[in-house]
Amino acid sequence: MNTKKKLISILLVAALLITTIVVACVPASAATGTLASYYKTNPDGKVGKQATITIDGDASDWSEDMMIAQGAAWDCPNHWKGSHENSLADCYALFAAWDNTNLYIGMQFVNTTDTWQNAGDQSLMDNGKMGSVPIVLGLSVDPNSKGMTGKLATPENGKSGIWGVESTFQTHVDHLFFMSAKVGDGGTPAMFTADSNGTTDYTTHCTSFTQAGITYKMADTNICSHIWGLNYSDSTDDVYSDSADWVDYKTFAGQKGKHDTKYDSFYEMKIPLSAIGTTAAKLTSNGIGAIFFGTRNESMLDCVPFDAASMLDNTMQEYHAGDNTSKEKEDDDLITVPLACIGKGGITPVTNPTDPTNPTNPTEPVGTTLTVNSKSNMFQTSSESDLEVGDTVTVSYNLTSNKKISSADWSLAYDSTKLKLNTAGADLCPVDGDTVNDSGTPVYGNFTDYNNPADFTAGGAFVEAEFEVLAPGSTDVTLTVNEMNYINGTSVVSIVDNGVVQGSSGATVTAASQTSGGAAIDGLLVNGKSNLFDAATTTFDKNVKKVSVAYQFKSSKDVINSSWKLTYDSKKLSLDSVTMPKASSASFNTNTSGLVEGAFTDANLVSYSSMSDFVVATFNVLGTGRTTVNLNVEDLWLGAVVSGDMKTAALVEGGVVKNDVASQSGFSGYTYSTKTLVTEGSDTVRGDVDKNGKFQIGDITALQRYFAEYRGLSSIDATAADANKDGKLTIKDVTQLQRMLAGLA
């Protein structure tokens, strides 16, 4: 096996390149992904059925055997932020039928908030209906045709999305149907197709429903025998868990009783096959891909098949108007979910029309190696070939900017059948340490920090991801930067806005090219990083059970206080212990997986006159590959008593390391040094003084007796008893054990 590592370096350019994954429709097994089992695409192989439907606002022609995809109820952003709003775009199920002349589409929306609200209240205003907001149907009729980006060739009123609805399609669609949720109101319903660039317009590539012979109606009903949805949920992660609070709203009784399906809306459509350039024979032999969306005028809010990564990525962020509702109402959603299939039991997805594995080119050899094409709307395309199964390939999007980046929003899409993502969490963002959702593909990341913007002035990887090669052929890794901003005085200036690079943003951006190689890791490589401490890397054997990262500090002046955040990949490491050995007043927050927050203040000052452990974190090893433990020191203040007065100076303030300490009064000649040690961790249970294999109240008693009676070291485990890790046993260790037992350390 070839174990070489490939690094693909991407150059920054100011051009918009939209990449489309060409997929007509996929089998159910490929569509369900890691979502809870209630989400289904082509359940039991259903692809719709041959039937003629009368479009009259009466859903009696439809049946559940026509269902081609199922979502879930009450999984839209309103559940977690903005539940008071009355326009509830909650998509539940997609249906399809056809005859020799027409394609028929059924779109089931739900509004189950009547189980906890009274009629007319909040989300049940206007009879619980969506009103004059767009709903959208997307079709992929010919997977080898030009895919639509979802954008207008010429933006109108500052909006690049069709009807002002911002979205970017990476999944292939070649027809988009926009209509009002209030039939007969809210604009002229129309079908849009792509120009040569994948964009569209309101003239040449726009056909009204009337011109195309398309009709649609709405019925106040729900044709599903079950309405599976979330009841109580405090996290969007619940859509990935079968153990979340799922209920059947057909039988569930909430605070206000059972759900009345009069609040639900079923839309039926008739689309002449001739209007979309196909026939019944082609439909049943090739299939048509389908997806539908609910919106709130400015952005998609929900869809079936469900694209959780795009519909929920900005749920907890604030809408620009500041009305305690979700940013999902206005973000630019990157659509990557495979479509549901109509008329055929599953077509092998085509990821690139020129791919040698493309079944439309059966004469081309498949080969034994993989080519990876790295693409972006902001970074230049680059490729690496001859990658063998088992190799690793790293895609690095490198950014140099004269402006510090105050906020950014991005997504990284890849084909999980050909590539396995080895990098996780904040490791994907070496410089800015984004909040990352890496639970599926695409991966989503964002950050906002106006006080401590990400510094790319010296260059660095904006996003960097390592993959393991799983299969030969050709594939794309696509980074879409939706937003990138910097602060100019009191103004926020966009470098990228709604996926469009702003050519006159005032920022100067360049790129650095890097290439490195190395063998795949049969174990765990731990990289200890920090904004203050030196970096260190150690590779451990795959049998190692614990690793420890010690950030060490030496300072010619004492420390009065500090606060910091330690991040780690919870898929590869679990926290065993964390200490600040010399800071007896230190407190820690370990409630969030992958994050430790620490702080201390000591008016008596803490001395680091010799190189000493500042923060020590020990982890249980969960996986292999590469991982990073990063200590971001937010504040570190020094103290010095001069003529009886306390002088203070910041070595680190707001995450920024200062270089002017020695110039401040009382700190003349100041020096400091740092070191980071990444070592194998001890199996000793911290605090297990009496050596019974666990830490409990008896261990505190054992250490107290040791000091009172001095029984000798043989009676206790001195390593476990050194709770504050200062290398000696004192009464301070008893205090630290008490803090540990109380959950304060």
Image (tube, grey):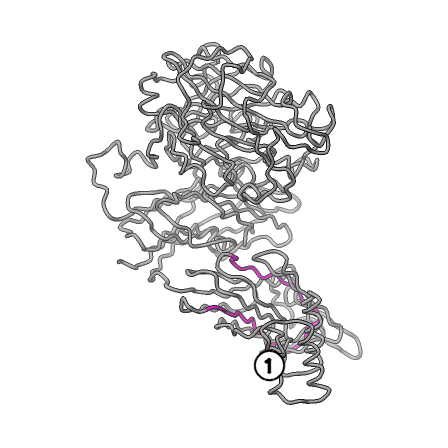
Quadrant in the picture for residue 691: bottom right
In the rendered image, the residue lying farthest to the front is: 251
Classify 10 Å Cα crowding around label 1: few (below 14), some (14-19), many (20 and above). Answer: many
Q: Indicate the position of residue 600 as horizontal and vertical percent values.
A: 70, 68
Q: Nearer the viewer, residue 305 or 186?
A: 305
**Residue indicated by mark 1:** 717
Q: At 64% across and 29% down in the image, what residue appears?
A: 112
| Location of residue 477 in the rendering, given as x and y in whole percent from the top left corner | 39, 44
| Residue at x-position 32% and y-position 25% | 286
Q: Is residue 588 magenta?
A: no
* Residue 661 horizontal side relative to residue 425, left or right: right
- Left or right of 158? Residue 271 is left
Most prominent secondary structure in the magenta stretch? strand
Q: Position of residue 725 (x, y in %)?
A: 61, 77
Q: Dot 1: what SS?
A: loop
Most extreme residue toward the left, as rendered?
363
Q: Is residue 457 visible?
A: no
Residue lying at the far right in this picture: please name it: 644
Quarter location, residue 608: bottom right
Q: Quadrant of the C terminus?
A: bottom right
**Image quarter hosting the N terminus:** bottom left
Which residues fall within the magenta stretch?
A: 545-570
Q: Within the image, what quadrant is residue 98 found in?
A: top left
